[in-house]
Image (cartoon, rainbow, N blue to C red):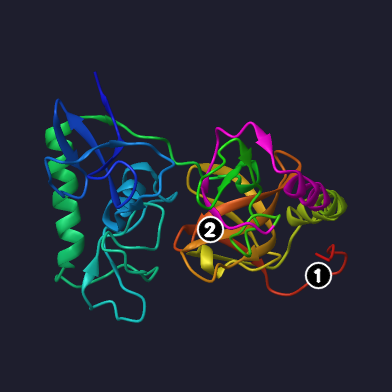
Amino acid sequence: MHLSLIRLSISPVNGTAHHGVMLGTEPLTVCATHSTDLAPVGENTAHSLCQTCTRAFLILTTPPHPGGEPDLRPAVGTGKGATAHRPIPGHLMGYCGKSLDPRPASARRKCANCTALLAALNRFHRLAGEVRVPADEVRPREDDVLWASSGRGNLVIGHRRNAAAGSALCGLPLSAPNPEATVECAPCCRAWMTERERRATALARMRARARWWTQRRELKTVQGRAADLNSGDAYTVSGCLDRHHVLAVTRPTRGRRLTILAYLPADDEIVELGLHHDRLLAIERPHAPEAGMPALS
């Protein structure tokens, strides 16, 4: 029977959590952190997640970019002959966490931190065998998630999150997703209904824009990171064949997760999506506005 990837921590309520498995009574983490005090903890707790485990989770769950990717890339701002880094599948980010250049590397010298995480993952697979991990959700819909307020005193009421501010639509600070909430905050609900009306107004315009897209004549196509997205772009991402038409991009003041407001022709709706800052995308961008192209606003 295959083991499932779980979260492990020394403290049951806070501190640092790691991804791993339990081999009988022995904990095994993907980042090679070892302590006999590590024990399973829940998903929605106050723990911070080990950054190495976060990158390992991306390595285990993200489909590779279509057409293949080079085994090694240089870091952003360095030449092809600089230290080579192993890229996380579907990302312009190394195993070590550095942002990478789209070009392949030519250097023989490899990043020691990338090599260390590769060795840790190889050891993890050797000891744990085949492990069940959640599939990468390439279209994580932020507007489907209810959150718990900071302090986690009331887990019955769920709040809608303001992607730009990081707080609830009602203004309360948030701590973590709260999928078990049974009641939605009334002020958040009213604000969310207003937002849905705004998206409904933009829907016809975005449908027309998507229809125009198939008749485009001059289009720049690049392999770039999610951080390069602009309003008016379209993109595809590994693990999903649908084209996403970008209405707006929210760049957080901290963290590395962007919020994208995009029109999805397959679903015929505008949704709020989450993307990692360094997610590798195939981006399509018009060279210049064309006659008859619908405006975005």
- As shown in the figure, which amino acid type bears the numbered disc 2? Ala
> What count of labels does the image hold?
2
Q: Residue at x 62, y 59 (%)?
A: 163
Residue 176 is covered by the magenta coloring: yes
* Mark 1: few/some/many CA within 10 Å (<14, 14-19, 20+): few
From this view, report whether residue 213 is shown above or below residue 19: below
x and y, in percent, of residue 172 in the image: 63, 56
Residue bearing mark 1: 290
From this view, report whether residue 83 is shown above or below residue 54: below
* Mark 2: few/some/many CA within 10 Å (<14, 14-19, 20+): some
Q: Which quadrant is home to the N terminus?
A: top left
In the depicted view, which residue is nearer to us: 99 or 281?
Answer: 99
Residue 3 is covered by the magenta coloring: no
- As shown in the figure, which amino acid type bears the numbered disc 1? Glu
Mark 2 vs mark 1, CA separation in Å: 21 Å
In the depicted view, which residue is nearer to us: 81 or 247?
Answer: 247
Q: Residue furthest front?
A: 153
x and y, in percent, of residue 285 in the image: 65, 67
The tag on residue 97 is none
Q: Residue at x 48, y 64 (%)?
A: 225
In the depicted view, which residue is nearer to us: 254 or 208?
Answer: 254
Give yes or no for contact between labels 2 and 1 (Cβ–Cβ under 8 Å).
Answer: no
Residue bearing mark 2: 282
Q: Residue at x 15, y 41 (%)?
A: 37
Sequence-wise first label, 2 or 1: 2
Q: Residue at x 15, y 44 (%)?
A: 122
x and y, in percent, of residue 48 in the image: 35, 54
Residue 292 position by quadrant: bottom right
x and y, in percent, of residue 185 in the image: 70, 43
